[in-house]
Image (cartoon, helix red, strand yellow):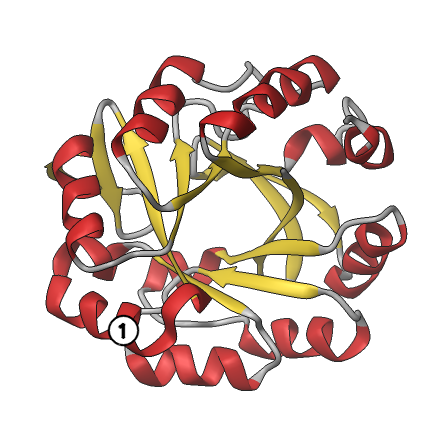
Amino acid sequence: MNIIPAIDIMDKKVVRLEQGEFDKEKVYSENPILVAQKWKKLGAELIHIVDLDGARLGKPVNMDVVREVARNVEIDIELGGGLRSEEDIENAFKTGVRFVVIGTSAVEDLPFCKFLAEKYKDRVIFAVDVKKGKIAVRGWKVDSGVEVAEYLNRLEGIGAKKIIYTDISRDGMMAGPNLERLKAILKSTSSEVTASGGITNLEDVKVLKELEKDGLCGIIIGKALYEGKLDLREALSIK
């Protein structure tokens, strides 16, 4: 199971939000490169970067920052936030990003996402962002009205290889993952699943590690690392 540190970027700084609320922002660093280098030094093999400004505006904003991270840190990057056109995705890959994460477009333009899945294979990851049982889009601000099970069926239908499931109610709250929902998602898809939201301590990591047998391939950890509640090196050492 891959353990993936998160770097959320707003105004070119590393921040964390609570439940995706932009008015609940806390700045942790002015330098995303140094943060990425830290996670690399501690043993991370992949980092999850979100362009929060891009997610809010519907187009990439911090691509220059992402490019500098990719240039200065020898680590794979998955990037999400405002990537809603093929041009945006191609530009992301040109910065050195290994994977892109697609959210809003996967809900609102399924033919486009089928094209992406066919062209880029497993380099495209589809976001399953859940709020009150429905898929949320446009920076998590809009309820799409799409049920989780229906959305997973859509992704199966277009041949999605990888998904990231986020329980928005747990994101940034350090209240533990939503295991019941995660287990249901693992049973409902053949895609590789990475889980995000609420992971707080080593016990959470150990519990999630047990779900490898059910298809859990990775977990994304954010605030717990920045607040010192969880040590990345210790988390990576769990067998």
The number of discs equals: 1
Q: Is residue 215 visible?
A: yes
Frontmost residue, 106 versus 132: 106
- Characterize the local packing of mark 1: few (<14), some (14-19) or many (20 or more) Cα atoms within 10 angstroms: few
Image quadrant where one finds the C terminus: top right
Q: Residue at x 77, y 22 (%)?
A: 229
Q: What is the x, y in percent for residue 98?
A: 57, 71
Residue lying at the far front in this picture: please name it. Answer: 213
Which image quadrant for residue 45?
Answer: bottom right
Residue at x 79%, y 35% (from the top left corner): 236
Identify the amino acid type marked 1: Glu
Which quadrant would the N terminus be assigned to in this image? top right
Residue found at x 50% / y 19%: 177
Q: Which residue is mark 1?
A: 118
Q: Position of residue 225 (x, y in %)?
A: 74, 34
User: Picture quarter containing residue 178?
Assistant: top left
Q: Quadrant of residue 9?
A: bottom right
